[in-house]
Image (cartoon, rainbow, N blue to C red):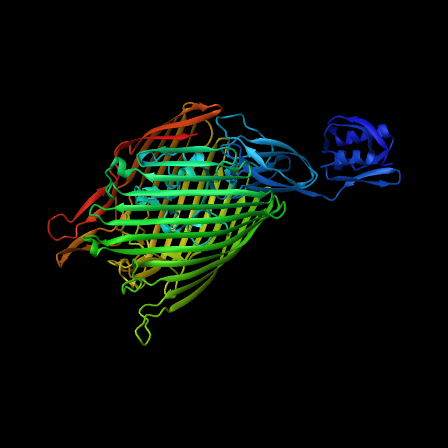
């Protein structure tokens, strides 16, 4: 009976009516429960002399139903669900680069996933015919018809959304491409480049400082203070390599060249278990991979720097490269900066290459090198730089298991002149941190509602907290450290129901430090290298539970327990300094610890996003130096550190308009940070020097046309705390200040308004090749607000002036140009 050839035309209809037509034409009885088939639909089919067995397989495909021959009847009944998996990458159609955080969903099943930080996705659903909806912010959404009768690899490309187009609308689905569902913030290169800063420079760190809840305590600094955390409590990664100093020119510019940035991810609430070692935030900067389709040359110039980048395919659609170079132009334009001599320069180089070995294996290699050479007015020099290198291998075991293996090198070094009166007397103070890292991260896409991540990592740290350059035996050097930091982790994201989602993870960290003992000699007077050892083992749980009352609303609660095994030792009164000795946890220094609780609400009606967040953070083993502690040539610096506690809490409110010709955001934060540290401020609690209670930020963008746009940014905040002298006494011809209570005073309130405009055009250069031009003009600090940078204390006892105020950057008009061929 099942081999009977059948010719029949079945238009799209309900499954029940289609079976009735088939029964009438073939005279074969079909038995079924109508309640099971009532909502089942069929596509249109035209069968010509096809066996009944094959016809039924096509007709019932994707319905979850099967058939059995019982006597002379064919019984239609539920069948065991067969899951099929579709997987692959989502890429930019123009250059082939992976899109991070893109949404891949099947609206009919209310099932979807986001691409991971390598652009990979995997979606397992019952076999059937579906429409696949792919979307990403700033790109045109795509609908793809797929037939899942076996596991499939689907490489998907999205085109840039050059102007507002009619959206693909899917009704009655709780799965949306809305960013309210993500625990992190994602920024594409296009978003980062739409916010010019001082002198027309587009800068990643300055863009983050425009975000709600991320503070910059001084103008012109790249330091980030996130939710009551210090600037050294942010894990900053460049292609997975740790960046210890993300600044050029004491922070006026960051080390991240905008031409070499693909994507930026920021974690402030729930920090996934694959990240560790910092307390406040994780900032993941992924370097651009280069265009795999065609060659391009782009660059630009402004009053701060000049840059140029080249990219193109190694093998078309299989491999690509990018090389980007940038150099400062302060010595060319001779701008009058108060913090350093205008002849100071910086430069950096980014390079990256990748190659797809086959459909399941890809390799990547990237390198960054940056250097600063700063001159003071009295010929002192300060040189520092970062070198990072990352070798990655991506492997797809099968349609559900993804692996990334990375070997990483990071080197931060700093040289500071101690005296420069004569060349013969010149000596330099050196600090450095070197890391070697090996890590493996697995992602298991068990189902659209159940994703599992696990992995292992190991880091070898080499710390040089401070010593005379090329004088390892100098008696006033600070002891070196060698540390091993390793961790295993497991995390899981589970959709418990249509309204509840659970993210949880556990990270088990082990830190072993070996600190070199000072002044150990053998019986012949030869210096011996002996070490003090200390091992710390700490579990770090974290959990996030989300409730979705509607598809465009989310309420979430988060808890993170984090440990940090290394910290920056810096005099808190220094507003600008690159003197950054890092020291690890040891016998006498316990690792920092943070208990972070957060509650949030996000609502996205159409083109708006409203968010409200509250947090409380309790930090233990916070370090600070005793008053008048000297960092340089002080081998006992560790004994002059004091440990204490810190409490931080705050509320953040933000309204964003994300679509249309006019877009922007209005954000307000109220927060407090207190510290209580032994032997400081007479043991009494005091506000941290990064305590800024009120902060208002307003940004706006208006597209007058496809070619002309306007941008603005306004910020207002409470002045940061500082400690002022209440008097002086004289000692050996010097004024020695007598200070008030710690951080009792404050700088005046800070405010600034920036405006800019962009004009874009294209000119034909040859054949189908065009050259894009972008001309930008703007004004920094439009109403010339005098915002103090710091107070300068006069140490000389001659003269009546004890202190002066140094102000920041006043009104500064600028012009910039960029191109792409």
Q: How many numbered markers are drawn?
A: 0
The residue lying toward the viewer, choosing from 544 and 168, is 168
Q: Quadrant of residue 13?
A: top right
- In which quadrant of the rendered view does residue 568 lie? bottom left
Image location (x, y in percent) of residue 92: 52, 34
Where residue 725 sits in the image (x, y, percent)?
Answer: 20, 52
Task: Compare residues 253 and 509 and report the one nearer the observer.
Answer: 253
Front-lying residue, 344 or 46: 344
Image position, residue 96 (x, y; %) = 52, 36
Q: Quadrant of the C terminus?
A: top left
Farthest residue, direction right: 71
Is 99 on the left-hand or right-hand side of 309? right
Q: Quadrant of the N terminus?
A: top right
666 lies left or right of 220: right
* Residue at the bottom extreme, as displayed: 523
Please state which of residues 587 and 522 is positioned toward the viewer in this rendering. 522
Where residue 50 sits in the image (x, y, percent)?
Answer: 81, 31
State left or right for residue 149 relative to residue 200: right
Residue at position x 44%, y 52% from top? 409
Image position of 205 with respect to 768: above or below:
below
Q: Is residue 244 visible?
A: yes
Q: Residue at 50%, 51% (x, y): give it.
A: 406
Residue that appears at 75% across and 26% down: 11
Residue 298 location, quadrant:
top left
| One can see residue 550 in this view | no
């Amino acid at each position: 009976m099942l081999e009977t050839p059948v010719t029949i035309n079945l238009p799209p209809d309900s499954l029940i009516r289609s079976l009735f037509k088939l029964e009438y034409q073939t005279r074969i009885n079909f038995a079924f429960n109508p309640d099971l088939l009532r909502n089942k639909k069929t596509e249109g089919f035209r069968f010509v002399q096809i066996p009944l067995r094959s016809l039924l397989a096509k007709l019932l495909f994707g319905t979850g139903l099967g058939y059995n021959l019982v006597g002379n009847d064919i019984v239609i009944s539920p069948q065991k669900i067969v899951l099929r998996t579709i997987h692959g990458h989502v890429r930019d159609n123009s250059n082939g680069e992976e899109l991070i955080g893109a949404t891949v969903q099947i609206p009919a099943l209310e099932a979807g996933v986001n691409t991971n930080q390598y652009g990979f996705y995997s979606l397992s659903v019952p076999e059937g015919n579906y429409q696949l909806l792919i979307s990403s912010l700033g790109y045109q959404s795509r609908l793809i018809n797929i037939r899942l009768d076996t596991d499939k690899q689907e490489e998907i490309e999205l085109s840039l959304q050059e102007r507002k187009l009619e959206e693909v609308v899917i009704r009655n689905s709780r799965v949306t491409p809305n960013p309210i569902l993500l625990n992190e913030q994602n920024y594409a290169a296009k978003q980062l480049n739409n916010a010019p800063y001082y002198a027309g420079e587009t800068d990643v760190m300055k863009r983050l400082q425009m975000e709600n809840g991320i503070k910059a305590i001084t103008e012109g600094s790249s330091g980030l203070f996130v939710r009551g955390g210090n600037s050294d409590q942010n894990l900053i990664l460049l292609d997975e390599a740790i960046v210890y100093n993300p600044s050029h020119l004491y922070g006026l510019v960051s080390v991240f060249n905008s031409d070499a940035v693909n994507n930026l991810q920021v974690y402030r609430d729930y920090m996934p278990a694959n990240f560790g070692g910092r307390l406040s935030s994780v900032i993941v900067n992924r370097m651009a991979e280069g265009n795999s389709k065609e060659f391009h040359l782009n660059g630009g110039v402004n009053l701060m720097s000049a840059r140029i980048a080249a990219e193109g395919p190694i093998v078309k659609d299989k491999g690509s490269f990018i090389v980007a170079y940038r150099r400062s132009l302060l010595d060319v334009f001779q701008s009058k900066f108060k913090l350093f001599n205008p002849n100071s320069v910086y430069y950096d180089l980014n390079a990256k290459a990748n190659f797809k070995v086959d459909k399941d294996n890809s390799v990547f290699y990237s390198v960054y090198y940056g250097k600063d050479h700063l001159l003071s007015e009295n010929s002192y020099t300060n040189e520092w730089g970062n070198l990072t290198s990352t070798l990655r291998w991506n492997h797809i075991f099968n349609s559900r298991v993804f692996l990334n293996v990375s070997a990483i090198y990071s080197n931060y070094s700093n040289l500071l002149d101690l005296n420069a009166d004569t060349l013969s007397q010149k000596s330099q103070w050196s600090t450095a941190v070197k890391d070697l890292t090996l890590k493996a991260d697995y992602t298991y896409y068990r189902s659209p509602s159940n994703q599992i991540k696990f992995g292992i990592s190991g880091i070898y740290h080499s710390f040089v907290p401070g010593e005379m350059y090329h004088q390892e035996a100098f008696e006033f050097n600070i002891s070196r450290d060698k540390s091993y930091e390793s961790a295993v982790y497991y995390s899981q994201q589970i959709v418990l129901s249509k309204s509840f989602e659970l993210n949880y993870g556990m990270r088990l960290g082990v830190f072993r430090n070996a600190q070199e003992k000072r002044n150990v000699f053998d019986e012949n007077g030869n210096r011996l290298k002996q070490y003090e050892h200390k091992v710390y083992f700490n579990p770090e749980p974290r959990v996030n539970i989300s409730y979705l009352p509607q598809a465009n609303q989310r309420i979430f609660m988060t808890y993170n327990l984090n440990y940090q095994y290394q910290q920056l030792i810096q005099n808190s009164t220094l507003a600008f300094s690159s003197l950054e000795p890092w020291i690890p946890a040891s016998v006498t220094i316990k690792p920092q610890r943070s208990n972070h609780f957060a509650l949030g609400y996000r609502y996205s009606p159409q083109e708006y996003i409203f968010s409200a967040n509250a947090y409380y953070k309790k930090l233990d083993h916070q370090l600070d130096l005793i008053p008048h502690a000297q960092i340089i040539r002080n081998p006992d610096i560790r004994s002059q550190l004091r440990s204490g506690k810190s409490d931080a809490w705050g509320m953040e409110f933000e309204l964003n308009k994300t679509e249309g010709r006019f877009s922007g955001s209005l954000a307000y934060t109220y927060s407090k940070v207190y510290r209580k540290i032994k032997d400081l401020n007479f043991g009494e609690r005091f506000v941290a020097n990064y305590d800024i209670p009120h902060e208002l930020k307003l940004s706006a963008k208006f597209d007058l046309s496809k070619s002309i746009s306007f941008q603005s940014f306004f910020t207002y905040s409470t002045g940061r705390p500082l400690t002022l002298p209440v008097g002086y006494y004289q000692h050996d011809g010097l004024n020695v200040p007598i200070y008030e209570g710690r951080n009792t005073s404050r700088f005046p309130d800070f405010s600034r308004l920036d405006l800019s405009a962009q004009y874009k055009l294209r000119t034909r250069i040859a054949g189908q090749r065009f050259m894009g031009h972008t001309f930008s003009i703007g004004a920094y600090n439009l109403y010339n607000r005098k915002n103090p940078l710091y107070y300068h204390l006069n140490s000389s006892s001659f003269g009546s002036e004890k202190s002066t105020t140094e102000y920041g950057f006043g009104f500064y008009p600028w012009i910039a140009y960029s191109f792409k061929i």
